[in-house]
Image: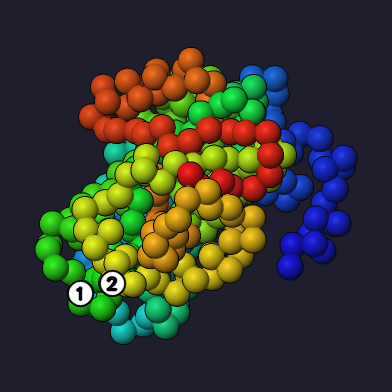
């Protein structure tokens, strides 16, 4: 679908467009001068939780995450709204309030937006950010010998699917998932930048393996991921054992499994968790080993956590050990 656009907008014709359709990334980056580059992203989706306030907050955090994943700081945001005509105005207000509170937490303002009528509610943001061109954390920057750090636990897909199927066995499981999705990746991005991270992306709809594969392929390397090192949200393993997966997990598995190699025997549900679609997930960061401790210590100082989950190797694809 993108080929006509890629042929129309050739990188050679736009030398200041540092990141565009040529090597797709989390956001577009346009160099203004030697010290400044504009970063822009857009993201919106239908509700992933029942509470309208938290839906708005999660959608906003998810959109802001793309700016952080590039190594930039957000400047301002625009609302993107699609609501049914008969949707209760109080519900719309709560969605917008959740988004506004999350944008305010990021230290920026909502400066406008656009709304349309639609059969299903949808909400998100267009976010503009600023960065130094030499501070770019592109997907393709991973280097052999780097270690891989993940900054949020996994399992959002199975937990939100359990919610839809009314299979949540403990309300605390849902609370943990909502808190995870609504948490900004600001501290993670700042820690990665200060540690000189070579590459990063945020883990969202393609799942851990899908997004790791994007990074590895763009860098021409392989990623080795240790199953035992992966963090999961409370309840995620139990729901996965019951095979409570969203349809997107199967789609992700079909797309990424040919380039995924398992060096150990995992149960089917364990394998599928690696393809589970995330919403507003953490950053996957590639950094030289000597600086990995800096990221983890900064995250803990900010009251958050991070985990070393693997390394970058001289090969192709993803290896699960």
Asked if the residue at tag 2 contacts the one at tag 1, i.e. Cβ–Cβ closer than 8 Å, the answer is: yes
Name the residue nearer the viewer: 29 or 173. Answer: 173
Q: Taking 72 as reference, is 82 above or below it? A: below
Q: Taking 141 as reference, is 238 above or below it? A: below
Q: Residue at x 12, y 62 (%)?
A: 171
The residue that label 1 is drawn on is 167
Q: Quadrant of residue 134?
A: top right
Q: Secondary structure at mark 2?
A: loop
Name the residue nearer the viewer: 54 or 32. Answer: 54
Q: Residue at x 40, y 23 (%)?
A: 295
C-alpha span from label 1 to label 2: 10 Å
Res. 276 visible in picture: no
Res. 310 visible in picture: yes
The residue that label 2 is drawn on is 242
Q: Taking 188 as reference, is 279 above or below it? A: below
Is 163 situated left or right of 280 in this image? Answer: left
> Crowdedness of circle 1 by 10 Å Cα count: few (<14), some, many (20+)?
few
Is 8 situated left or right of 284 in this image? Answer: right
Q: Position of residue 97 (x, y in %)?
A: 26, 56
Q: Quadrant of the N terminus?
A: bottom right
Q: Residue at x 53, y 48 (%)?
A: 263
Q: Position of residue 98 (x, y in %)?
A: 27, 55
Name the residue nearer the viewer: 210 or 103. Answer: 210
Q: Secondary structure at mark 1?
A: loop
């Amino acid at each position: 679908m993108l080929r006509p656009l890629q042929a129309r907008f050739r990188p050679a014709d736009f030398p200041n467009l540092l990141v565009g359709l040529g090597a797709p990334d989390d956001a577009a980056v346009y160099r203004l001068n030697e010290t400044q580059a504009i970063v822009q992203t857009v993201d919106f989706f239908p509700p992933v939780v029942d509470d309208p306030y938290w839906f708005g907050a999660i959608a906003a955090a998810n959109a802001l995450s793309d700016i952080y994943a590039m190594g930039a700081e957000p400047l301002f945001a625009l609302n993107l709204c699609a609501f049914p005509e008969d949707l209760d105005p109080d519900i719309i207000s709560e969605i917008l309030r959740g988004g506004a509170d999350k944008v305010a937490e990021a230290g920026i303002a909502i400066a406008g937006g656009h709304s349309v009528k639609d059969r299903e509610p949808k909400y998100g943001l267009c976010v503009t950010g600023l960065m130094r061109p030499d501070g770019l954390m592109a997907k393709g920057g991973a280097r052999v010998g780097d270690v891989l750090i993940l900054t949020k636990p996994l399992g959002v897909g199975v937990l939100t699917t359990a919610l839809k199927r009314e299979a949540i066995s403990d309300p605390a499981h849902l609370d943990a998932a909502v808190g995870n999705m609504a948490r900004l990746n600001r501290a993670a991005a700042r820690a990665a930048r200060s540690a000189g991270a070579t590459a990063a992306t945020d883990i969202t709809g393609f799942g851990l393996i899908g997004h790791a594969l994007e990074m590895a392929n763009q860098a021409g390397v392989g990623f080795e991921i240790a199953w035992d090192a992966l963090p999961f949200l409370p309840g995620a393993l139990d729901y996965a054992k019951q095979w409570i997966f969203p349809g997107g997990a199967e789609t992700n598995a079909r797309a990424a499994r040919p380039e995924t190699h398992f060096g150990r025997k995992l149960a089917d549900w364990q394998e599928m968790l690696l393809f589970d679609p995330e919403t507003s997930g953490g950053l996957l960061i590639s950094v030289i080993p000597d600086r990995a401790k800096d990221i983890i210590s900064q995250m803990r100082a900010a009251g958050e956590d991070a985990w070393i989950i693997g390394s970058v190797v001289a090969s192709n694809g993803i290896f699960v050990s």
